Amino acid sequence: MLAANIEYYKPATIQAALEQFYLLKNKRKRPIYYGGGTEVLTLGRLNLIETDAVIDLKGIRECQSFEFDQEYLITGAALPLTYIEEKNLFPLLTSSSMGIADHTARNKITIGGNICGQIFYREAVLPFLICESKAVIAGENGIQIFALNEIFNETLQLEEGQFLLQLLTEKRYIHLPFVSIKKRQQWDTGYPLLTVAAVKVEDQIRFAFSGLCPFPFRSRKMEDELNNLQLPLKERISRALLQVPSPILDDIEGSKDYRLFVLRNTLNEIILDLEGK
Amino acid sequence: MIGKGIPRKESLDKVTGYAKYTADYETPDMLHAGLVISPHAHAIIKQIDISGAVKMPGVRAVVKGENLPLTGEELSDRPPIAYDRVRFHGEVIAIVVADTPYLAERGAAMVKVQYELLPVVNSPSEALRQDAPLLHPNLGEYKKIQMVYPVPGTNIATLTKIRKGNMKKGWDESKVVVEEKFAFRPSDHAAMETRCSFAQIHPNGTIEITSSSQAPFLIKRLIGQYFNIPPGYIRVNTPLVGGAYGGKSSTQLEILAYLASKAVGGRLVKILNTREQDMLTSPGHIGLEAIVKIGSTNDGNLKVAELLYFWDGGAYSDKSIDLSRAGAVDCTGPYNIENIWCDSLCMYTNHPYAAPFRGFAHSEVLFAFERTMDVLAKKLNMDPLELRYKNAILPGHTNPTQVRLTSSTVGNLPKCIKKLKEIFNWEEGQLIELDDERVRAKGISCIWKNSTIDPDASSGVILSYNTDGSINLISGVIEIGTGTKTVLAQILAEKLKMDINDIHVQMEVDTLNTPEHWKTVASRGTFMAGRAVLAAAEDVIHQLKSLASFILRTRVDDLEVGYGKVYVKSDSKKYIPIKDIAYGYSFPNGNAIGGQIIGRGHYMFSGITYLDKETGAGNPGPEWAVGAQGVEVELNRRDYTYRIVRAVSVIDAGKVLNEKMAVGQVMGAMSMGLSFAGRETFRFDSKGIVLNPQLRTYRPIRFGEHPIYEVAFVETPVKDAPYGARGLGEQGLLGMPAALGNSLSAALTVNINYLPLIPELLWKVKEGG
């Protein structure tokens, strides 16, 4: 239960969702788009979310699609994570998804909600960053398609009223060799100390990270160092560590130095695994 | 019947969702309370502005803390609602009573409080410092009961001393000495059911409280004491309780529910803790800092132990005084040590305060002591199991409080150690290298526990017959998930030689009609209530026989009760069915005699004494349960991650009354101990704020993370317990933190003396990171 008056709307079309948003805005409300609701509840209990109206996107058909067309895998933003895992159309995404929260929560958490959420791990975005997916965004100007790596900078850079509709991933990425690893403070549950998704594309390994900084990211600079086959592995990793963006997380899940220790080990594991493939 | 794995009587209701817990009770006239809690750990309350809340439609009252009596189980130091000062993050500042839970929460959010922050005491060692802020400047003026020794002008809520033997002699005889320091922070019980209470005051003045509690009779006593109400005017109900682990034996929410009801003219008011409040506001699991110094001869005979325990009791002393005393009573492991010096200090800090936690200070003390035993074994170059076997406490030895032990009181520890050695394949070695990185390592711990309980604690049982010869069993034991009420039915079925399905157990407790059972804590339910059941059964047997003797025209002592009959011993064909006399006997001509047979029985321990102030000498409780435990881990030395492969317990149960439930209790306790040791802790910032008061950041062990559990028993009967059974509800937990710590310390060849044992800690200790 949240101690706030919150209106709930579930539009059936993109247009209706946008209209609802601006209608509420004109009434001086603070609407937010809503996926599975887990974060609204969790943070709402701690008074960390300010809203008085939610617009549920699960009723929009486009947000529910999960299929291949000629070129792309289309991933609807309102799909629950467990649905994506069960269908398993994109093994790397399945693997990253399964590390998030727990099964019960993943029945609710949607892919769009995870990517656009306030809790800063946003691990579901990692596979899309390294597969250079496209983000389909709905807004006042209609439906627009952006390269994810351009529009995702720590968070998805949405303008007021816009929402994520779908992600498009080129088919050629779907079955490439990949690794997805999540390291936690202890055992098999909890937020990441570090989550890494890596994929090998034409002898180059791409990496995206969550849990290292208070945002998920893909770093070309780190990739350059890690793929520099001229140097011994240890050296490559050391040089990549110098390129980690700041700030590095230092919190109740783990200290900064420990996270770097974990990063070093994990990069080692991933590279040994993928370079052999 | 005794020993069999009878399913719990309440199981079906629980698994079908039919069982009702306190929060499940809803009535249309019920009001709801929302709590305003402190966001600061230590501050002066400058102003509480309730005007916004009072104006809200649907808000019936806002209760503040002025002019309320101080509360606390042994030392009255706690205002039920803070009014001039807050001393921990989560402390209650006001209660808002409203028509719905939603309005109550809204109202609570409308209360505005101005604070002036004070410096924070963030650990027991900080609390001890000369210049530490004093949490309770009036410590010397608080009301207290016996065996409470506060030190006014300091943050010491009580000091318990153990002085046994001659320390100088002990050190002189010791050739090998080790000293280790330990620390861990407070944590939580994380019971599945968050605490809930509702209260009303009836027009005749009777206060009726329903609560998810292990101690309804204590609530009755304390509410009466605090507010000066005669005991007959307080009635407390307890439905099934969804996990308690000690946390529901403190009286806290009940006081608030009563005050809330009083503020609205006695109407029914419910308070249901949110998970966050259950973790912060209601009392949690105590923390500890310890220094353990022990000495032995060159061949490993323990000679002396010097122990300093600084308990992190939090902002109020409530139950932590008793916890710190229990930690002093069993201040060593279960070993024969002639010279012991222990100071156990219950410290005030600006942390959430403590309730009992399954094991009652024992897993905490044993973590420190049993880790030190391994350090000693290493220094002696001796097998750690051998060291323990050599020093195991035996009948004839004395405990730290100088009680001379018998086989009945202390059981058989050497037998437990031997059995552990076998089950745990100790012979194969403590360390097995699996490859370059991975190692398997074993750690062990011995355990013991007495229950420091009130000398006059009692338990009562009422049995009443139905017309078909079946029996209703009423006991004040709370069914907190331990299955005790089923065990009581087993004891009765055995005694009366009857079908357990003909015994109807009242699961709920209502203090108006249920005989008192002290508190459902300390693994004492089966012992005390079991004895009361046996006494009540004797009473029933006596009544049945005297009526039957007259009908069968035989002597009373020639009769026997069983199989639904009262029969003549020498001629079992001569009998009368119990159902024909359970409600009195009717003659063929209509004359009748007797009436419904009602049996009663009670039990109180004898011989328990207060402890001497200067030496701690005295008899703290009825018996020690002993055992030996092991934990095996598989550790990756490169990245310090590990998984627990298996955990083994060998416990002297006295007598196993219900095999399945006994194993279940021990396994459950083991998992709780591993969870506490492996990952559970509150994380405080420098201002004393708890940073993880939700289950997404405070994460107990989950399904899928468990090791293989193995449980075995030794049976050395306790003379005066029902069928010889010892306490069993807590023992499985006690050695888990130490055994896990010992396995990891062995695997990494460093001393790991902090909890929780997460990979980052191992990395830090090993690599100095």
Image (cartoon, grey):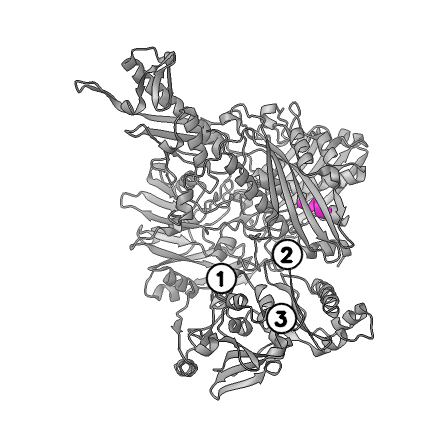
User: Image point 46% across, 57% down: which residue?
Assistant: B274
Left or right: residue A121 compared with residue B455? right
Residue B730, quarter of picture: top right
Q: Amino acid at mark 3?
A: Pro
Q: Secondary structure at mark 2?
A: loop
Residue B260 visible in the shown view? no
Q: Is residue B768 left or right of residue B669?
A: right
Magenta region's main secondary structure? helix
Q: Amino acid at mark 1?
A: Lys
For residue B696, what is the image quadrant?
A: bottom right
Task: Kindly identify which residue carries mark 1.
Answer: B46
**Residue A44 pos. (x, y %):** 47, 66
For disc 3, the chain is A
Mark 1 secondary-structure assignment: strand
Question: Which mark, by number, is residue A214?
Answer: 3
Residue A186 circle label: 2
**Residue B197 higher or lower than B577, as above or below:** below
User: Foreground: B558 or B338?
Assistant: B558
In the image: residue B649, left or right of residue B106: right
Q: Earlier in the sequence, mark 2 or mark 3?
A: 2
Q: For this rendering, which residue is in front, A121 or B137? A: A121
Q: Residue B666, labelled with which disc? A: none
Relative vertical location of residue B685 with respect to residue B526 in this rendering, above or below? below
